[in-house]
Amino acid sequence: MKAYPLVLSLLLPYTLRAQSPVTAIFTHAINAGTATSYTGRGASGNSPSGFTGDFYTYHFGTNVATTNNNDVLDSFTVAGSHYKYLTAPLSVVFRRVNNANVTGLRKSLWFYANGAAAINNGGTFALYPDYDDSLERVFTERFFDVGIDNVFQNANTTNNNNIERMDVIFPGGVSATDVTKAGFVVFDRGSDPTHDPFWIAAIKTLDGSGNPSAYYNAVKGESFEYGVDVGSSINYVILRRNYVPTADGHLLMMDNTTAQNRDGVFFTFSNLGVPANTLIYGYSLMDTTVVASPATNIVDYTNGTNFPTTTDLPLGGLDPVAVTGLWVTSPTYIILPERIETFDARASNSDVTLNWNLGITDDVGELVVERSADGKAYVALSSISSPDAGPQVWVDKHPLTGSNYYRLLLLDKNGGSMAYSSVSTVDLPVTPGIKIYPNPVENRQFTLSSSGLADGAYFLRLFDGNGRPVFTQTLNEAPGTGKTINLPRILAAGMYYLQVLDSKNNKILVKPLLID
């Protein structure tokens, strides 16, 4: 909930930043899987709803509608580039510290509501999404019509929480080969242009328990850096569930039906200071009262000096939409070690042997081995359906002369790209040689192509069946990918012999040539 003037955000210190507003979104609707209904009063506790004496009926999921209950974010546009969701194992953790107003586990969520009218005492709230009060689970689903209200608000002036940091963790880590093509997005429910500011920092390392132990420098997301009216206005109701001093049975009404927009700001790996091909483990969000510099301050969220527990609006009022995860222009730019733990290609005589070790494969539908001659255009060589985790070997019996670039592609069970391996390169020596085609020769014309020949002049000599020279030609350079040779029209059909000599008169080729 927000009701503060624009001047506050305009007076904040501003430094030119490279993060970019989200300019378009693309979602799809899914059906609810559950039907939940219950009765109860308004939310109580510190910063009560003001409706604790009223009584309501609450309906969720298929008790409200049988289809199209949730909007799931698929992709979005930033600065002319299209970013899509890349499936990667992740967890979302909300780090709590008790404060003067909130203790214990408090859950405060907003849900897409059916209708814009306020609900009076004795009325019914009809909320389209499934009922789910697990913040950690909801924020892994990419729901665009659910979120948290005032996630970092501590003060008692409005709906409040005791959350000091929100961590989005990739336990196996992720790295980007191009740090401008991958990143993280934050969507806020609010009114333009007074969306809420926040700190975001990439997680550099995890400790033995899987918690952040080091960060890159934090970057501030400012109110004016969001897109404008991109996610459209949504009717919503804020619900809250208290556990202290007594536990509520369900989420209860904290704020009646209202409407606001949902807009986003995107941070590439580059924006967050992450170098190319460097493993990171996710990102954390904090309110802007946090003393985020140096980055070591961010690690201990229980340090009251660096993480004040008195945060008030507007600095604690971020209302994040339940969208997290990794977003990329193409999966080719991302390495997921948790999926493909190791990958290596090595020459073995005239073959190339590929070795890899797969991690998580439960949701993998197919593994594809790909090869390229230039590291840009790849073709599929082989595929394995439902590959097993662990080590595997595959042999390329027909590698290319020169450079061979190999990589693995994992597809999900619907055929969508999930992850790529790193690229492993094998260089095979080029054996000097010349090819002639077509042979038999048609229309007194054929093509010479060569590989591995040194620069310099070459000489062609054509002999008839009696060993008499009938044609000669000088080439100023090796034929390369193709040199057309035109023979005299007066040559009779029959068998001939072609010699190719280098500038030192060494015979490079002697080959029968049949002229039709």
Image (tube, grey):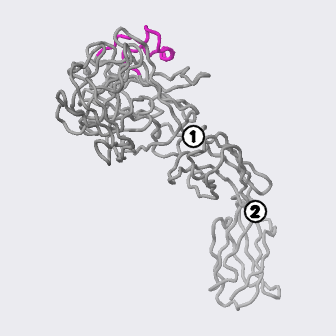
Asked if the stretch drawn in magenta spans residue 289, the answer is yes
Residue at 56% x, 31% y: name it: 171
Q: Look at the numbered disc 2 and give the secondary structure of its residue.
A: loop
The residue identified by callout 1 is 335
Q: Give the quadrant of residue 172.
A: top right
Q: Which amino acid does label 2 sit on?
A: Pro
Q: Residue 432 carries which label?
A: 2
Q: Would you place residue 246 above or below residue 27 in this image? A: above
Which sits in the foreground, 251 or 425? 251
Residue at 48% x, 33% y: name it: 269
Cα–Cα gap, marks 2 and 1: 37 Å
Circle 1 Cα neighbour tier, 10 Å, few/some/many (<14 / 14–19 / ≥20): many
Main secondary structure along the magenta-highlighted residues? loop
Circle 2 Cα neighbour tier, 10 Å, few/some/many (<14 / 14–19 / ≥20): few
In the rendered structure, which segment of residues is drawn in magenta? 286-312
Asked if the stretch drawn in magenta spans residue 221, the answer is no
| Upstream in sequence: badge 2 or badge 1 | 1
